[in-house]
Image (spheres, rainbow, N blue to C red):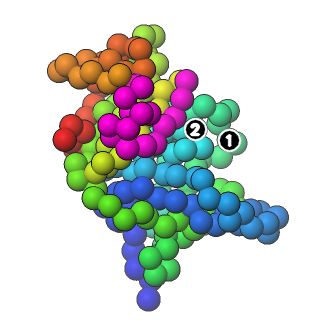
């Protein structure tokens, strides 16, 4: 029986356990993380943005991308196999297996930010975890830990200072503060 994946199912920290490439190679090396909030996400491979769903097809729209964009939209068909989320490429030939880490997912939220010259940034919060992405770096870690403290995040209304830059909050979703 096929169980439909919903956006709400995706909230949390995901670890990629398998990548099967177009040539059939298998990569089981740990290290790729994906932190998903209500719609906003941060991916340890160097990009962040919003996730959209159309049926069982999910598309990762990138607001911040430290790599040159690929030739195709980042879209995958999602399905469950037990507790494993299986993503199969729509425009490219790949399969990824994702497993969610245990842990609280509240508070959950995101701040969509713009800096000098309209430069985008994103702060995502899921439970005790955070994701940060700007034009210089992408981080996923624990709120209050060294990486988080190094950002020097200070929030004041629709303004935020983080990573030494003054940002304007363009859009919020959910709750970022604890």
- Where is residue 146? Give x, y as percent: 42, 33
Left or right of 86? Residue 176 is left
C-alpha distance separating marks 2 and 1: 13 Å
Q: Which residue is mark 1?
A: 70
Q: Which residue is mark 2?
A: 46
Q: Residue at x 21, y 37 (%)?
A: 177
Q: Residue at x 49, y 62 (%)?
A: 57
Q: Is residue 38 above or below residue 172?
A: below
Q: Is residue 71 above or below residue 8?
A: above
Left or right of 76? Residue 72 is right
The answer to whether any part of residue 135 appears in the image is yes
The magenta stretch is 136-151
Q: Nearer the viewer, mark 2 or mark 1?
A: 2
Seen from the viewer's position, the closer of residues 2 and 132 is 132
Please identify the quadrant where the C terminus is shown: top left
Left or right of 11? Residue 45 is right
- Where is residue 8? Give x, y as percent: 31, 61
- Where is residue 98? Give x, y as percent: 52, 65
Would you call the spot at circle 1 few (<14 residues within 10 Å), some (14-19), or many (20 or more)? few
Which numbered disc covers residue 109? none
Q: Secondary structure at mark 1?
A: loop
């Amino acid at each position: 029986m096929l169980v439909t994946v919903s956006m709400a199912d995706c909230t949390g920290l995901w670890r990629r356990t398998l990548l099967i490439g177009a040539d059939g190679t298998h990569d089981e090396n740990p290290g790729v993380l994906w932190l998903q909030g209500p719609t906003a996400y941060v991916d340890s491979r160097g990009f962040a943005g919003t996730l959209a769903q159309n049926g069982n097809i999910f598309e990762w729209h990138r607001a911040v991308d430290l790599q040159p964009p690929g030739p195709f939209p980042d879209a995958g068909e999602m399905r469950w196999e037990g507790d494993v989320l299986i993503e199969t490429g729509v425009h490219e030939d790949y399969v990824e297996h994702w497993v969610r880490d245990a842990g609280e997912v509240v508070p959950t939220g995101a701040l969509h930010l713009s800096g000098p010259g309209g430069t985008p940034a994103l702060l995502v919060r899921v439970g005790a975890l955070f994701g940060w992405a700007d034009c210089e770096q992408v981080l996923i870690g624990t709120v209050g830990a060294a990486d988080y403290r190094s950002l020097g995040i200070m929030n004041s209304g629709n303004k935020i200072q983080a990573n030494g830059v003054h940002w304007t909050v363009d859009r919020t979703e959910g709750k970022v503060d604890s």
